[in-house]
Amino acid sequence: MDILALRNVSKHFGGVAAVDGVNCSVRQGEIFGLIGPNGAGKTTLLNVICGLADPYQGEITFKDQRIAGKKPWDIARLGIGRTFQIVQPFHGLTIRENVAIGAMFGKKGHEGSIKEALSLADKALELTGLSHRADDLATQITLSQRKRLEMARALAMEPDLLLLDEVMAGLHLTEISEMMEIVKRVNEQGITIFIIEHVMKAVMGISHRIMVLHYGKTIAVDTPERIAENSRVIEVYLGERYAARRAKRLAGSEMGS
Ligand SMILES: Nc1ncnc2c1ncn2[C@@H]1O[C@H](COP(=O)(O)OP(=O)(O)O)[C@@H](O)[C@H]1O
Ligand SMILES: [Mg+2]
């Protein structure tokens, strides 16, 4: 079953078609990766989905409900949470308070009590491995922890679909592995994931399917294995060097087995 479906979605900035006639469906429960060169329209597509890029052309349905034209807070309440490429926590607040604010804008919205918001925050901090920093100020944490804070804030909204925008950018290898585990763990909770990511090892490693965007257009939607071998994707994004390294790695693992 599809949780999200985009039909012929376009978003223009002046004369530039940042997103140009995209059709795609995200299945309930999957990790759906979105890759493509800088400026391909990935972030714009995420903004369109969560209501931050109004107006646009096309039709978007989430859980069989049309969401085109709805405001970001209404879309959040329907069950779409997101992180931002640039992490912006409230500096005067603790990690826990920052995440609790997410809960206030989520499904239950302002009807939930503060106590309930804090309890959702604690759950989200646990899931993102941040419980031990809960009472620290948001200024006192590392980039990796800020990325996880951003994710915890989105999780506290109790989303059915979580949109992630480059949560691995700038992280060290071990931090990337940790983040991959967190994304998988979140997915195992039944949350569908739509992830924009430049770190190939990560997006190839966790996605069930991947869509490649180029100048606002979809050039491929397929399994990671087939995306890695798609000649058009290699040409516009992955590059010949990636393809050669991958072929070498595969040959190596065949010889070893
Ligand atoms: N707010 C904006 N105003 C004008 N142009 C924009 C705006 N946001 C994005 N763009 C343009 O739209 C295109 C896609 O950008 P973006 O969605 O940020 O790409 P990506 O996330 O894939 O790197 C780029 O050409 C970018 O310059
Ligand atoms: Mg972007």
Image (spheres, grey):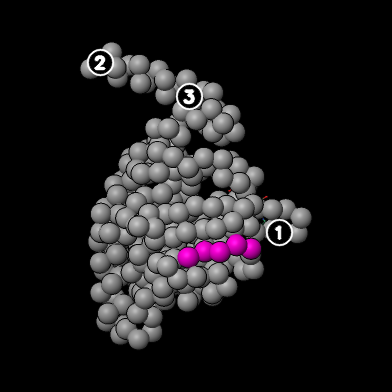
| Disc 2 secondary structure class | helix
Q: Nearer the viewer, residue 227 or 177?
A: 227
Residue 197 in sight here: no
Q: Report which residue position mark 1 lands on.
A: 13
Task: Report the amino acid beneath label 3.
Answer: Ala
Quadrant for the C terminus, please: top left
Whether residue 185 appears in this view of the structure is yes
Label 3 vs 2, first from the N-terminus: 3
> Where does the magenta region start and end?
57-61
Q: Do the residues under discs 1 and 3 have CB atoms within 8 angstroms?
A: no
Q: Position of residue 172 (x, y in %)?
A: 40, 40
Q: Amino acid at mark 1?
A: Phe
Mark 1 CB lies closer than 8 A to ligand 1: yes
Locate residue 98, reporting x and y percent.
Answer: 39, 70
Specify which label sits upstream in the sequence, 1 or 2.
1
Give the farthest residue toward the top: 255
Magenta stretch secondary structure, dominant: strand
Label 3 crowding class (10 Å Cα cut-off): few <14, some 14-19, many 20+? some
Q: Which residue is mark 2?
A: 256
Residue at x-position 36% and y-position 44%: 208
CA distance for labels 3 and 2: 20 Å
The amino acid at mark 2 is Gly
